[in-house]
Amino acid sequence: MRISVEAAGGRLPQLIEAAAQGEDVILSQADRPVARIVPITTSSFRVGILPPLALGRGPDWLEPIPEDEIALWEGDL
């Protein structure tokens, strides 16, 4: 399904349900695709708070940041 961002605003619950059922939901703006709504599977999602500065850490980005690395970012060394 392809829908404009403007039209999607009032239909978000239905679009989320469609994605959860496996439908490909593409949001478009000015006739260009700009985003996709996809379901999150429990095997690919862990509930909790992401560790700070996790971006760019590679495949272990959900793991806690080592204390010595946090100290470098906070200027404690």
Image (cartoon, rainbow, N blue to C red):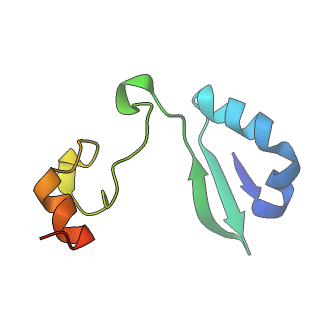
Asked where in the image residue 12 lies, by quadrant, the reply is: top right
Asked where in the image residue 62 lies, by quadrant, the reply is: top left
Q: Quadrant of the N terminus?
A: top right
Q: Quadrant of the C terminus?
A: bottom left
Is 30 rendered above or below residue 6? below
Q: Residue at x 15, y 60 (%)?
A: 69
Is 39 rendered above or below residue 60? above
Q: Residue at x 45, y 31 (%)?
A: 47
Q: Position of residue 60 (x, y in %)?
A: 19, 46
Q: Position of residue 67 (x, y in %)?
A: 16, 52
Q: Nearer the viewer, residue 58 or 21?
A: 58
Q: How many marks?
A: 0
Taking the image as shown, residue 44 lies to the left or right of residue 21, namely left
Is 23 rendered above or below residue 43? below
Asked where in the image residue 76 lies, by quadrant, the reply is: bottom left
Taking the image as shown, residue 36 lies to the left or right of residue 6, namely left
Q: Nearer the viewer, residue 64 or 20?
A: 64
Q: Residue at x 58, y 52 (%)?
A: 36
Q: Residue at x 78, y 36 (%)?
A: 13
Taking the image as shown, residue 5 lies to the left or right of residue 52, namely right
Q: Residue furthest front?
A: 76
Is 8 rendered above or below residue 33? above
